Image (cartoon, helix red, strand yellow):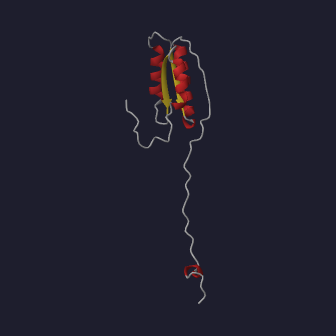
Amino acid sequence: RSRPSPSGNASKPALIGPHEAIITQLQPKYNVLAASVISSTQIRKRVTQAISHLGSTSDLPCVVLLHARTADVCKMITIVEQCKRLLREEGKTCFQYNEMFELPEAKRKDLIEETVLERSRDEENGGEDE
């Protein structure tokens, strides 16, 4: 898998960031697949990935944690609904838990423009009368 480049993304938090605490809580009890949904995510690919994970054999029960930014939530809901439909068709039981929250606004650097005012002719001459 590709790794994020160190340059340019330092100010933008990773999508998984807000979910790390809950993943840490779930991992001792569950086999967790955390997957993001972004605008370029293919619905079919994410559905296949989630269903495959939920159907895998593991010592721990399998869970899928899907997360998305606000603009991509509709796509994430579509993925979840398709997964639920496929699981029901296979006669499997699934449970859905939702969490919505607002991320704090990222701190931005204030831009202060330097303004140069024109000086009047009197100021240029030192204010002397001729």
Q: Position of residue 25 (x, y in %)?
A: 54, 19
Is residue 50 positioned above or below 72 on the image?
Answer: above
Q: Report how many numbered discs are placed on residues in the image.
A: 0
**Where's residue 109, x and y in %?**
54, 49
- Which residue is the extreme one toward the left? 1
Q: Which residue is drawn at 45% across and 11% down?
A: 58
**What x and y, as percent, mark residue 86?**
52, 18
Mark yes or no: residue 82 visible. Answer: no
Q: Nearer the viewer, residue 44 or 3?
A: 3
Q: Give the percent coordinates (x, y) of residue 72.
A: 54, 35
- Residue at (41%, 36%) from the top-left corner? 4
Residue at position x 39%, y 33% in the image: 3
Quarter of the image for the N terminus: give it: top left
| Quarter the C terminus occupies | bottom right
**Can residue 31 be seen at all in this image of the molecule?**
yes
Q: In which quarter of the image is residue 69?
A: top right
